[in-house]
Image (spheres, rainbow, N blue to C red):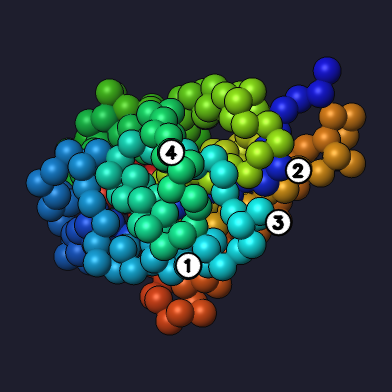
């Protein structure tokens, strides 16, 4: 039986957030804590993040209507939701296509390590720093948090839902850095070593676009062919600065 895939799939990391800015400041100052007052789910875009979202919104809007996204899903975290909403305001997709929030697309959970820099983790939880060194980020699960494998488990379910409900359609997903990487891991059937090599090569840019297109020639039932990864030309063409700082809660992943 043929497996369902979208016709096209775009996976976009949210625009720069206040958490990205705060993490950069804390790391540069050598601080243990990242100064963010809100819950991570409530952290909004920075002014630059809004500008980045407008840039990719215009890029999608410039496509012929029959090529634009017709199904749009986003993490419920405010920075991802706002990125998708701003894109809609610029005409990236038809407003009649309701934005679907899916908690399975949320950021990876870091538990007790949330909002700590790498300096803070070594100072306050040296045993967790050592566990992570031994196990690696793919398998290390901090207390109260998730490993990459845990995030991948919920993403398997999300991709199955996309395949069942939106097969043959053009789907846009707006989410987070680790989620972009974990979706690549699943769609391209990668190994731990392969996806971590991509991760080491550089962070996913804010509003960076990863794009797949269904290719019926890939195997018995067809598959998704990667066409773009971490594509930032829409920002560069408008002179919008490209940023890639991890989120405030991602200090443990760096």
Labels 1 and 4: the sequence-earlier one? 1
Q: In the depicted view, which residue is nearer to us: 26 or 13?
A: 13
Q: Report the residue at 31% width, 50% height from top.
A: 82
Q: Between tags 1 and 4, which lies in front? A: 4
Tell me the residue that label 4 is attached to.
Answer: 98
Q: Mark 4 and mark 2: span between their CA atoms?
A: 23 Å
Labels 3 and 2: the sequence-earlier one? 2
Tell me the residue that label 3 is attached to.
Answer: 227
The label number, if any, that marks residue 214 in the structure image = 2
Q: Between tags 4 and 2, which lies in front? A: 4
| Element at label 2 | strand
**What residue occupies the far top of the structure in this picture?**
1
Q: Mark 3 and mark 2: span between their CA atoms?
A: 10 Å
Estimate how packed mark 2 is, as few (under 14), some (14 to 19) or many (20 or more) residues with alpha carbons within 10 Å.
some
Labels 4 and 3: the sequence-earlier one? 4
Q: Mark 1 and mark 4: span between their CA atoms?
A: 19 Å
Q: Between tags 1 and 2, which lies in front? A: 1
* Residue contact between numbered discs 4 and 2, judged by CB atoms under 8 Å: no
Q: Quadrant of residue 9?
A: top right
Tell me the residue that label 1 is attached to.
Answer: 58
| Element at label 1 | helix
Q: Report the residue at 83% width, 35% height from top.
A: 222
Labels 1 and 3: the sequence-earlier one? 1
Q: Position of residue 174 (x, y in %)?
A: 45, 46
Q: Quadrant of residue 90?
A: bottom left
Q: Mark 1 and mark 2: span between their CA atoms?
A: 24 Å
């Amino acid at each position: 039986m043929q497996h369902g895939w979208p016709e096209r799939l775009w996976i976009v990391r949210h625009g720069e957030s206040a958490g990205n800015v705060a993490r950069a400041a804390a790391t540069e100052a050598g601080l243990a804590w990242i100064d963010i007052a809100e819950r991570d789910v409530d952290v909004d875009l920075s002014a630059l993040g809004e500008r980045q979202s407008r840039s990719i919104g215009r890029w999608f809007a410039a496509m012929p209507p029959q090529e634009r996204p017709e199904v749009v899903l986003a993490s419920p975290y405010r920075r991802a939701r706002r990125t998708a909403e701003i894109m809609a305001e610029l005409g990236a997709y038809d407003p009649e296509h309701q934005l679907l929030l899916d908690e399975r697309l949320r950021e990876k959970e870091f538990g007790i390590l949330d909002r700590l820099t790498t300096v803070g983790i070594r100072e306050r939880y040296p045993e967790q720093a050592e566990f992570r060194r031994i196990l690696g980020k793919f398998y290390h699960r901090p207390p109260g948090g998730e490993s990459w494998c845990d995030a991948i488990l919920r993403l398997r379910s999300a991709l199955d839902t996309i395949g069942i409900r939106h097969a043959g359609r053009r789907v846009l997903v707006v989410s987070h850095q680790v989620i972009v990487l974990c979706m690549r891991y699943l769609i391209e059937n990668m190994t731990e070593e392969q996806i971590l090599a991509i991760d080491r090569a550089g962070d996913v840019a804010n509003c960076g676009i990863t794009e797949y297109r269904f290719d019926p020639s890939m195997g018995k039932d067809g598959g998704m062919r990667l066409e773009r990864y971490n594509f930032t030309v829409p920002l560069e063409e408008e002179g919008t600065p490209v940023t890639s700082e991890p989120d405030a809660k991602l200090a443990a992943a760096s």
